[in-house]
Amino acid sequence: MNHPLKNIDFRWLLASRVAGNLSLGFAEVPLMWWVLETTGQASLVATVALIGAIGALIAAPLGGVWADRGHKRHLIQFTYAADALVQLAMIWGIASGHLELWGVYVLVGLASLFGNLRSPALGALQPLLLEPNQYQQGNAVMSLATTLGMAASFALAGTATGFLGVAGALWVGLGLVVLAALLLIPIREPQVLSHTAHQQPARAMLEGLRFIRRTPVVFWIVVIAMLINLILAPFGALAAPYAKGLGGGAADYGLLTAALMVGQLAGLVMMNFIRMRNPFLTFLLGTWGLAGGVGLLAVAPHLIVALALLALFGVAASFMNVQAMTLAQQAIPKEMMGRVFGVLQGLNMGVQPLGLATTSGLLAVMGVRSIFAAMGALMLLASLAWFQRPVRSALKIAGAWPERALGGN
């Protein structure tokens, strides 16, 4: 089996996505810093971030419909061009002194809109460029590169904001957005016949939702992914009081967050060299790893134990994410890939504000350790889904014939 990196079109897509992810920090960090310096209110920074998350609920399913109408590469490039215009508007507003808080809300909302219109097309384009037996390694490589790109982005953006100022950092982000669009030009996109060209968007979205509901293995992948996002979204809010409860300080809080990221990166590296041939076992052990990683934080006696548990959670999450994406690519017909991915992204992003709101309410009535215990119990309960007969049958087929698509091509 050829490694996906031997595919020139995949390499162009990989380079474009890394450039796109590098640009994220150069938009968010300087803008959030400007909001904090201008208003002096940290709560408004959170409000700006919340607006971005809400945009996914609307834009991602619609982006999936448009992606299935063909020319995914053109849609991605169009949204990058729109992102560049938003960046220019931010730069002009800050440089001229005319940018106000309501303008920030509008620009962040637009940036979120275009980013989430783009994401389903990116997800649907990748499997078109690869053979089915390359999906797992392709997902592992792409996830590793884009995760590293995003992590580097925020660190570099903070440094750039300090040296170049807010407007200067935004100019760097603008250059990266333009680069991401240009790197897509050489890609030869295979065309897939679709019947969505003359469909109403709402009807096309419902088709994607119905496919998820009627395909047990995809349905439970969605449920588990939503649970992971429910846990990860409020982690930052829980990690600080948890570190304090362990007798630590700000440095220990940073270590807890880093342990999760290190675990995810380690898992993605391993997935580049390991071929998972038993999806059922991967999902079952992965879900148990998630349950143990978060649930045992309730009884962790020392920081070292907590760091190990969070690293375990990160490894399990990366294994689950790559395997889930691989199975979804096998199960979803290529002509429906955009719509289904759009619905998946909308649901996963939509639960993040719910996770934050739920955690805020729970913190008023129970301790951090009790919340972690409840999260672990919930994940353990969710693992029972993999024992359902339709799900096990689908996972068995995926393990026996990884080169075949479960939902047809």
Image (spheres, helix red, strand yellow):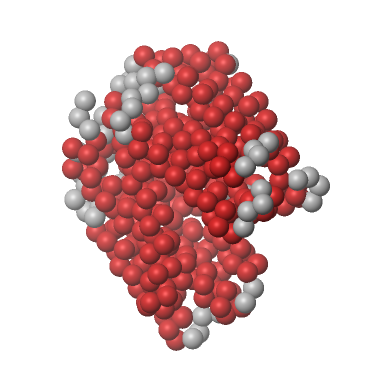
Q: Is residue 347 above or below residue 331?
A: below
What percent of the width, then of the height, locates residue 87? 40, 70
Number of marks drawn: 0
Q: Nearer the viewer, residue 389 or 38?
A: 38
Residue at point 18%, 37% (across, down):
6
What percent of the width, then of the height, locates residue 84? 36, 67
Q: Is residue 259 above or below residue 396?
A: below
Q: Residue furthest bottom?
A: 96
Q: Nearer the viewer, residue 395 or 122?
A: 395
* Quarter of the rendering occupied by the C terminus: top left
What percent of the width, then of the height, locates residue 69? 37, 43
Residue 114 visible, this angle: yes
Give the left or right position of residue 104, taking residue 297 as reference.
left
Residue at point 46%, 52% (across, down):
116
Q: In the picture, residue 251 is in which quadrant?
A: bottom right
What percent of the width, then of the height, locates residue 27? 43, 66
* Quarter of the rendering occupied by the N terminus: top left
Residue 226 visible, this angle: no
Residue at point 57%, 53% (across, down):
252
Q: Nearer the viewer, residue 259 or 167?
A: 259
Give the left or right position of residue 408, taking residue 347 as reference.
left
Q: Is residue 130 above or below residue 41?
A: above
Residue at point 33%, 51% (across, down):
17
